Structures are given as structure tokens and as C-alpha cells.
Amino acid sequence: MYELNHQVLRTDQAGVPLEWIDYQDAVRLYYLDQVAFTCGSLLYEVHGGTNAITGKRSVIGVNSIIATHGNKTLLSKIRARYVPPLNNRALFRRDAHLCLYCGNRFPISDLSRDHVTPVSQGGRDQWKNVVTACRRCNNHKAGRTPEQANMELLAVPFTPNYAEYIYLQGRRVLSDQMKFLLAHFPRASPLHQRVSQLL
């Protein structure tokens, strides 16, 4: 069994990833009979009270991936238009904590968000215009484009799809959860190759 701080991956009935939930939310979904099916490893066994009539104690086994009932048609329409919110934690993870100018890996405290086309030159604060940069490279580039600063951009920034964003938001993603999410990554995505190498 795992520690209670491991997240459970919740999907819809079609197996499309939706979100990370904690064990309490997972147990609630089991109790309310909202779980359509489960897969992955058994994470926890949560013990409840003892039934006064039968004398049996309730036990709910929580798997690492649970599919829940819901309106899958509506969800797929929403997901098709979905652009994940941009935040530094997900951005740094998308870029594997590498500065996309010097190519070195840094701790989060030494990383920053760089706008490839600076905001001062009409660039926007969106996934396809931002990369992870170390503070030194970001300061050197300043309000210039990589070409103007004579700096080479090592990778093309991209917008993660819904499943990739869920992966980027996960803490301590288990291998079975990673495999499941990987099946929903576009094959051409840089994350697909990187996550495949971890398995």
C-alpha cells in the first residue's frame, strides 16, 4: 500500500483523463457509486465503521486510476477547445527544468518564464510564446527576441493538450498512471518522447 498523499487519477467513462484527486475524494466517489471502473494498482484500503447488524467492517479499496460516470459528450466538446492555464510550475515541468537557451538544468528557484517575443514587442503571455529560462539567460536576453539577442532557442514552445497538462500538474506520478496518460499524448509531442523514456 502507498502513503495517503499519493494522488488518484480520475477519468471519464471513456477513460479520458480528467483530474487528480486525493484519497478522500476518491473514497467519496466509491461510496456514492460514481465509479464506473478502475484500473492501475491498488493504492489504499480505507476502513470504515462496523455495521451494527452484520458486524462487518466496511473496506473501500482505492485504485490509482478510477473512471467515473458523467456526460462524456459534453466533456469531449469542452476538452477539444481547452487551453490549459499557464503557470510556472507546469511550464518548468514541460521544459524539463532546462533553460531553453543555455541547455542547463536548474532548480525551480533559479528558473524564470521568458517570453520568446517580448511583451514589449507585442508578444503574448501564452504557451507558444513562453519558455523556461535561467535567470542569467533571461536577464541577458532582456526585452529582445532570441535573434536580436543572438541567442539560440533550443526547442519550440508548445501548448500541452489536456492529458499532458494533467501529467504536468501531477505530484509523484506512478508508473501505471504515467503509462495511462502517455496513451493520450500526441505521438509528435516532445513530452511523449520524454515520458516514454521514463517508463
Image: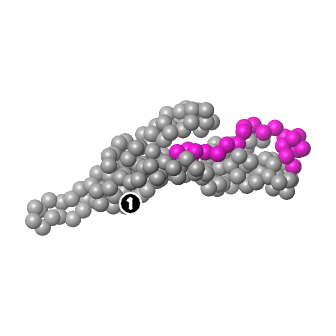
* Magenta region, main secondary structure: loop
Quarter of the image where one finds residue 57: bottom left
Instruction: Please report the residue visible at 45 percent of the width from the left and 39 percent of the height from the top.
Output: 180
Q: Nearer the viewer, residue 156 or 152?
A: 156
Residue 158 seen in render: yes
Instruction: Please report the residue visible at 38 percent of the width from the left and 60 percent of the height from the top.
Output: 25
167 is within the stretch colored magenta: yes
150 is within the stretch colored magenta: yes
Q: Position of residue 162 (x, y in %)?
A: 54, 47
Q: Residue furthest bottom?
A: 52
Q: Position of residue 13 (x, y in %)?
A: 38, 47
Numbered disc total: 1
- Horizontal relation, residue 152 to residue 86: left or right: right
- Horizontal relation, residue 152 to residue 70: left or right: right
Instruction: Please report the residue visible at 61 percent of the width from the left and 45 percent of the height from the top.
Output: 160
- Horizontal relation, residue 181 to residue 108: left or right: left
Q: Nearer the viewer, residue 129 or 143?
A: 129
Q: Position of residue 193 (x, y in %)?
A: 58, 32
Q: Residues within 10 Å of mark 1 (few under 14, many from 20)?
A: few
Q: Secondary structure at mark 1?
A: helix
Please name the colour scheme applied to the rendered image. Answer: one colour
The residue beneath circle 1 is: 25
Q: Residue furthest left?
A: 53
Instruction: Please report the residue visible at 49 percent of the width from the left and 34 percent of the height from the top.
Output: 199
Quarter of the image where one finds residue 195: top right
Write the start and end of the magenta stretch as one range.
144-168
Where is 168 relative to 187, above or below?
below
Where is 35 relative to 148, above or below?
below
Q: Position of residue 86 (x, y in %)?
A: 65, 54
Identified by mark 1, the residue type is Asp
Residue 107 seen in render: no
